[in-house]
Amino acid sequence: MTEQAGDWAREREQDDAAWRHVADKRVVTIGGGTGSFTVLSRLKRYPCQITAIVTMSDSGGSSRRLMDEFGQLPVGDLRQALVALSRKGALWREAFTFRFREGNGRATAVEGETGAEMEAPAAQAGVGGHALGNLILSALQEINEGDLLWGIRDAQELLDTAGQVLPITLEHTSLCAELEDGQIIRGESDIDTRGEREPGPLSPVRRVYLEPSAPACAEALRAIRRADVIVLGPGDLYTSILPNLLVEGVAEAIRASEAQKVYVCNLMTKHGETDGYHASDFVRRIHEYLGERVDRVILHDGSLPEHLVDDYAAKAQQPVEADVSTIQQLVPEVVVAPLLAVHGETLVRHDAARLVSAIFAPHHLDALTPARHADQVMAGARAPRI
């Protein structure tokens, strides 16, 4: 057997082991953005009951405009989760992710319109920059007399999703960040893009909070309490993961749940949010806001093509150092594996297949990935709950 064939056989064995381990279990993912999309797009192939609980603190782009115009909650992360779980085929997924161009399109002709009206740009018609899926979700909510949950259920039916999608809250709230220098930044979008706007040294984030406070969606709390496995991440620590733990009742429900709690650490630091963080810093922040330790942490082994390291360094982003020995003092299980996938030759993302295998690897599995990567499941001494 060639080395490549042996690697393939081992990965297949690991995937089969994860498949058996997760069969018929209730799996809850908590997060938002591309990280949740990665997990869900692969997880839907497994024989488990999936609930994707999504952050609702988005304050930019198409979601912001719908909030301002119709008073609706942000739906961008809901849309991404629905698309990730869709079994309807590429056409429906592409339709939900399609985004109208800003200002250069033309409005659709309607009987009775004048020529000037028919030549109105898309922006004037109100769709420029919008994601079509966001508009569909907005329409489904209106069809259901303003009930977002029923609108999501209709979207699930349209997309034939492999699980359910739930908002973490049904109330309007804004994410705020207090910096070490005392400055307050209000709005998820401003926190998220701070590093892009200001390339130089920035004051670290001291804490994040919601204003006003928001109660959790009852269905989301029920799913958390009934879960067998709860997966936090991957995703931006301060804008995709921690905002969920700030919603009233969520951290308490996770602590009370008998589910195995898994945290997937980021691949890269983010300028303006996690500058200089090691993996243990991410884990400590999760524990601080959760009020308890997680059971398993998933880490990338740190390998990254040199040209990508240089590209990200130019944006003040660095690979997250997997300080395994420190994390072993914080959690019972640490899984280290080569989880890197490069999209478009420039974007660093998690490899969906390897990530899901690592999340659900049985405790007794000796190796999660090809031996030449020296990947392993590291089971430290059981850490005390905090």
Image (tube, helix red, strand yellow):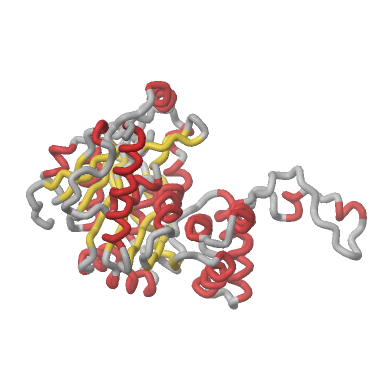
Quarter of image, res 1: top left
Residue drawn at x 92%, y 53% as measured from the top left: 115
Percent x, y of residue 187: 45, 50
The front one of 166 and 249 is 166
Image quadrant where one finds the C terminus: bottom left
Percent x, y of residue 29: 36, 59
Up the image or down, 385 lies above or below 99; here it is: below
205 displayed left or right of 95:
left
Q: Is residue 84 visible to the viewer in this orientation of the structure?
A: yes
Residue drawn at x 25%, y 50% as measured from the top left: 286
The front one of 335 and 276 is 335
64 displayed left or right of 354:
right
301 displayed left or right of 381:
right
Up the image or down, 329 lies above or below 270; here it is: below
Residue extending furthest toward the bottom: 145
The front one of 167 and 59 is 167
Up the image or down, 126 lies above or below 152; here it is: above
Residue drawn at x 48%, y 60% as measured from the top left: 85
Percent x, y of residue 366: 18, 45
Quarter of image, res 113: bottom right
Residue drawn at x 29%, y 43% as measured from the top left: 10
356 displayed left or right of 280:
right
Percent x, y of residue 201: 36, 27
Q: How many marks?
A: 0
Q: Is residue 245 visible to the viewer in this orientation of the structure?
A: no
